[in-house]
């Protein structure tokens, strides 16, 4: 499955639009507790543990998006947008959403 944030793939033609697809991932409060327990790994204002968890959530959202696109018969997703939202009581959860347009490219 080809994925891109751009509206097209250079050198490839969009033969068919299959529809809008999305994938979500939610990090719960326990993940944040675990990350903050490892806060000592902050170097230069960055937390490697926190960044690793965000990368995993983003990849999960993109994998879910690709799976949904495949179910529609697509072989690519264009115009992908990634969003991050804080949710829940006391903002205890983080949601990563990936959305885009499933297409068939040739």
Image (tube, helix red, strand yellow):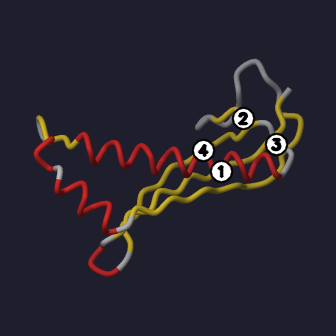
Q: Distance between the residues labelled 1 and 3?
A: 11 Å
Name the secondary structure under disc 3: loop
Mark in front: 1 vs 4: 1
Front residue of 81 and 28:
28
Residue that lies at the very extreme toward the bottom in this rendered image: 89
At 60% from the left and 44% from the top, the residue drawn is 80
Q: Count neighbours of disc 4 (C-alpha within 10 A) and say few if under 14, some if 14 to 19, many if 20 or more.
A: many
Which numbered tag is attached to residue 79?
none
Choose mark 3 or mark 4, whichever is in front. 3
The label number, if any, that marks residue 1 in the structure image: 2
In the picture of the structure, the residue carrying the numbered disc 1 is 65
Instruction: Using a 10 Å C-alpha cutoff, classify the residue at mark 3 as few (fewer than 14 neighbours), some (14 to 19) or many (20 or more).
Output: many
Q: Which of marks 3 and 2 is nearer the N terminus?
A: 2
**Residue 15 located left or right of residue 45:** right
Q: Mark 4 falls on what kind of element?
A: strand
Q: Badges 1 and 3: C-beta atoms under 8 Å apart?
A: no
- Contact between labelled residues 2 and 3, with CB atoms less than 8 Å apart: yes
How far is mark 3 from mark 4, CA to CA? 14 Å
Residue that sits furthest to the top in the current view = 11
The image quarter in which residue 84 lies: bottom left
The residue pinned by badge 4 equals 80
Q: How far apart are marks 1 and 4 (CA)?
A: 9 Å
How dense is the environment of label 2, judged by Cα within 10 Å: few (below 14), some, or many (20 and up)? few
Which of the two labelled residues, at mark 2 and mark 4, occupies the earlier sequence position? 2
Task: Give the CA distance from mark 3 to mark 2.
Answer: 8 Å
Q: Name the N-terminal-most of marks 3 and 4.
A: 3
């Amino acid at each position: 499955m080809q994925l891109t944030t751009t509206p097209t793939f250079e050198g490839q033609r969009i033969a068919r639009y299959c529809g809008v697809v999305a994938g979500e991932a939610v990090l719960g409060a326990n993940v944040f507790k675990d990350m903050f327990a490892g806060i000592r790994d902050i170097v230069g204002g960055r937390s490697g543990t926190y960044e690793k968890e965000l990368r995993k959530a983003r990849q999960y959202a993109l994998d879910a998006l690709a799976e949904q696109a495949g179910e529609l018969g697509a072989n690519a997703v264009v115009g992908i947008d990634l969003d991050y939202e804080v949710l829940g009581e006391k903002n205890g959860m983080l949601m990563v959403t990936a959305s885009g347009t499933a297409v068939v490219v040739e």
